[in-house]
Amino acid sequence: MEFRDLNRQYKEMKSEIDLSIKKVIERGHFVLGSEVEELENDLLDYTESKFCISCANGTDALILSLMSWNIGPGDCVFVSDFSYVASASCVSIRGAEPVFVDIDLHTYTMNPKALEASIIRVINEGRLNPRAIIPVDLFGLPANYPEILRIAEKYELKVLEDAAQGFGGAIGKRKACTFGDISITSFFPSKPIGCYGDGGAVFTNDESVAELIWSLRGQGRTRSNKYENTRIGLNSRLDTLQAAILLVKLKKFREYELETINCAANLYNHLLDGIVLTPQVPENYLSSWAQYTIALRDRSTRDILKLELEKNGIPAMIYYPIPLHQQKAFGELGKEEYFIENSIKASQCVLSLPIHPYIKEEEIQFIANTINKVLRD
Ligand SMILES: *Cc1c(COP(=O)(O)O)cnc(C)c1O
């Protein structure tokens, strides 16, 4: 059994993907070819955002966003503490400081009350200039934007939505990748919509920001001349081959994958209810289930269950074993007096189970039965 079975997905759409790849190779325009523009347009059509700039990966998408706001030394950015390292390393790479914010234990996303407390603390300390908030749409679920956007407005902070795992999620009719002043996603193979390598995209409704990011991803070039450079930028473009693959995958994602993965999650919820803490999706929210993450009562129960599942051929992963504020990469940041207890608790108790649009009912039943057996013994 695979954790996320990309091979099963490929078999389902093989003829279309092969044809799409072949066309690119025969035409020979390998970087930012016409498929890239087509993909950006399809992404805009799906998310209903105004501007989309594809780039080389999700991490670059975050860095480009912070560059466009000129966030750097002396600035700070509030980041959800329970996430992949890139959500915060993008801030450090710019020479600014991430301030780690605790999460909500029901959803694993940024806790708005903890956010406001962190903002007030930084303002009172007066050492750093608060600039932006990076809420993370973790495991496919949008963060609590109704509250976070209200706080952002109150303290005049920008919001950078890290939807690297969040593509396809929604709150009501509003889709992920539209909640931030800038929003980003990743097309890493295991994300809700993944390519066969690295890829990413930035979304915004702000035309001047879009124009700046377009220039920054291409060495700071001007529109009219690739060899006229008006600012220092990155080389962060999307390969045409990846766009060609993503065009096919986005179509399938819209046609049925988002629906089938929600069926899989519902079956898990039904079978595991009362046995483990199943993931909570608040009313009116939609998850795209980048991960299906349960919580156990404590670390030893979690670690035993992970081992027993693996003995039965079921891969299970810990996302994330170390809260960001405890990562050595960030040095002493966040290791002081603040309370980040939910994030610490989550890192000890969570376990992500296999999920993808092609997982079979029998497989979910087998996993749930195995969990039931292990926890009963
Ligand atoms: C994967 C991920 C990223 C980085 O995306 P890459 O394409 O791998 O660079 C950033 N933030 C979160 C939350 C992620 O899961």
Image (cartoon, rainbow, N blue to C red):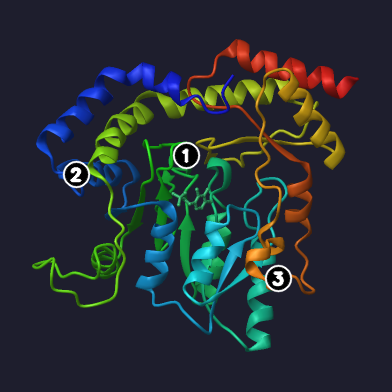
| SS for dot 1 | loop
Q: How far apart are the two marked residues, 2 and 1, measured between alpha carbons?
A: 23 Å
**Residue at numbered disc 1:** 191
Q: Alpha-carbon neighbours of circle 1 within 10 Å: few (<14), some, or many (≥20)?
A: many
Residue occupied by mark 3: 334
Crowd around label 3: few <14 · some 14–19 · many ≥20 (10 Å):
some
Q: What element carries label 2?
A: loop
Instruction: Characterize the local packing of mark 2: few (<14), some (14-19) or many (20 or more) Cα atoms within 10 angstroms.
Output: some
Q: Is mark 3 within 8 Å of ligand 1?
A: no
Nearer-N-terminus badge (1/3) = 1
Would you say 21 lies left or right of 111 here?
A: left
Q: Residue at x 32, y 41 (%)?
A: 46
For the residue pair 348 and 23, the one nearer the viewer reads as: 23
Give residue 100's position: percent from left, percent from top.
65, 66
Examine the image and state in which quarter residue 136 appears. bottom right
- Give the residue type that dot 2 points to: Phe
- Give whichever of discs 2 and 3 has the lower sequence position: 2
Q: Nearer the viewer, residue 136 or 191?
A: 191
Q: Which one is in front in this view, the residue at disc 2 or the one at disc 1?
A: 2
Q: Position of residue 118 (x, y in %)?
A: 67, 73
Query: Image quadrant for the C terminus?
Result: top right
At x 38%, y 72%, the residue is 67
Return the residue at label 2: 30
Q: Disc 1 marks which amino acid? A: Lys
Of circles 2 and 3, the one toward us is 2
